[in-house]
Image: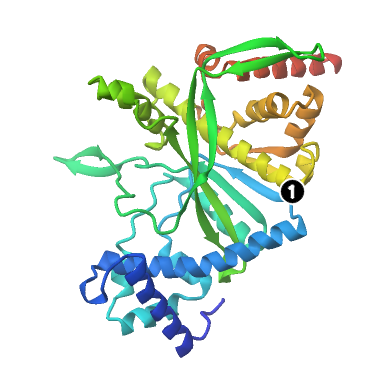
């Protein structure tokens, strides 16, 4: 079994200095007046600096070697508390322990202050987190994509013997591990209509005109592998309205109406698995799944085109894995982006889609196999329903040709 690296006095002194610097200049606290949570944040930021160095080196290596990338789409990432795991993977756990002891800080106390990241719920999310760490350990160019939930599922309370579901406020003190990327933003459309237009070349094309648009903002968390040799990226999306405030309504006295669009948009990344017993809940679930899938596919296609001249070779450079049913709209969405946004012919787009996408099924239990009504799909994603109908017709024609 692997042993912790030998602890050198120079490493302890360097980490101690790094923690004090973070406490002073990033947290803004004097050591004599710092609370335990201030120390936790300072240690996390010092550890993150080590991760970033490996992160950038690994990213440069991926581009230099033109490595094939794995994109893991999952509605959950149950990453847990990262302090111990990150320090251990970096080989800095004992270094940090000794450095903090010299500062009069108990690492066992401050590590308990870290909230469990409310980004997942069960085995599905834990598997996704394990895959991300495993890919980093193996040096695979892996990218995780999901949603940055503000409140996760719920926090359990017991009142008079009954469960009370309470809000999980895991971001009250911020998240020291993540980097907000306000420059990485994509527009996500919903509802609207699909019009047939004729191009200058005389070709007929379908143009989706969304009735509603929200923005997807990226937040990146480095995922370090064992001994920090490789660090991959978990990119999570936060939903924002196109306009944060409808100023005309606000000045007219309609203060609630002025932020109605904000509430509707930000509900997408508010909680994990909103109750789908109502029509509104079902719609929100579908909006969540399409939101993160569309943003992720736009992002990875952009990355591919930054390095390669065409999307026709996407399958040679990217493998997109769908973790259970939640990201399955990726099939229709990838086809839509290839055909509508990149002017790729249907047959070529289908070949790219089949060659790039993979799917993992985790259970056959009826309650875990999502279904959406045709009416809801046609209302929320009209262009995708056209594509789904065409895929279905193509599949039937293929079976008939085989005499099935």
10 Å neighbourhood of mark 1: few (<14), some, or many (≥20)?
few
Q: Where is residue 7 in the image (x, y as percent from the top left)?
A: 48, 86
Height in image: 192 above or below 19?
above
- At which x and y percent is residue 16? 39, 80
Q: What residue do we see at 50% from left, 37% from top?
A: 216
Q: Farthest residue in the bottom direction?
A: 9
Can the viewer see residue 367 in this picture?
Answer: no
Above-or-below relation of 360 to 105: above
Q: In which quarter of the image is the N terminus?
A: bottom right
Q: Nearer the viewer, residue 350 or 403?
A: 350
Relative to 169, is 129 on the left or the right?
right
Does residue 31 appear in the picture of this structure?
yes
User: Which quarter of the figure has residue 390?
Assistant: top right
Residue 255, percent from left and from top: 25, 24
Residue denoted by label 1: 307
In this picture, is 9 found above or below 64? below
Q: How is the image coloured?
A: rainbow
Q: Position of residue 126 (x, y in %)?
A: 49, 50
């Amino acid at each position: 079994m692997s042993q912790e690296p030998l602890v050198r006095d120079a490493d302890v002194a360097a980490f101690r200095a790094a923690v004090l610097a973070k406490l002073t200049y990033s947290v803004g606290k004097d050591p004599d007046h710092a609370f335990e949570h201030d120390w936790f944040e300072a240690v996390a930021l010092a550890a993150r600096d080590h991760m970033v160095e490996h992160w950038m080196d690994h990213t440069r290596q991926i581009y230099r070697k033109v490595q094939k990338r794995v994109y893991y789409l999952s509605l959950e990432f149950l990453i847990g508390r990262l302090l111990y795991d990150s320090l251990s993977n970096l080989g800095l756990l004992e270094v940090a322990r000794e450095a903090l002891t010299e500062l009069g800080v108990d690492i066992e106390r401050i590590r308990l202050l870290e909230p469990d990241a409310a980004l997942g719920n069960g085995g599905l999310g834990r598997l996704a987190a394990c895959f991300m760490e495993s890919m980093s350990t193996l040096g695979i160019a892996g990218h995780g994509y999901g949603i940055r939930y503000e409140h996760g599922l719920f926090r359990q309370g017991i009142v008079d013997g009954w469960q009370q579901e309470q809000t999980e406020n895991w971001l009250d003190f911020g998240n020291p591990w993540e980097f907000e990327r306000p420059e990485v933003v994509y527009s996500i459309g919903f509802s609207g209509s699909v019009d047939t237009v004729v191009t200058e070349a005389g070709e007929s094309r379908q143009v989706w005109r969304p009735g509603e648009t929200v923005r997807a903002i990226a937040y990146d968390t480095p995922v370090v592998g064992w001994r920090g040799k490789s660090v991959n990226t978990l990119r999570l999306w936060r939903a924002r309205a196109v306009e944060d405030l409808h100023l005309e309504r606000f000045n007219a006295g309609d203060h609630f109406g002025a932020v109605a669009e904000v509430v509707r948009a930000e509900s997408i990344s508010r909680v994990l698995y909103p109750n789908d017993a109502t029509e509104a809940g079902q719609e929100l679930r579908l909006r969540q799944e399409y939101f993160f899938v569309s943003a992720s596919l736009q992002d990875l296609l952009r990355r591919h085109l930054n390095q390669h001249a065409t999307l026709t070779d996407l399958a040679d450079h990217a493998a997109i894995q769908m973790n259970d049913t939640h990201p399955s709209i990726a099939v229709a969405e990838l086809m839509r982006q290839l055909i509508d946004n990149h002017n790729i012919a249907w047959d070529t787009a289908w070949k790219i889609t089949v060659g790039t996408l993979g799917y993992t099924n985790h259970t056959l239990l009826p309650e875990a196999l999502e279904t959406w009504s045709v009416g809801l799909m046609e209302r929320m994603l009209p262009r995708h329903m056209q594509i789904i109908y065409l895929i279905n017709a193509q599949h039937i024609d293929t079976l008939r040709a085989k005499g099935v």
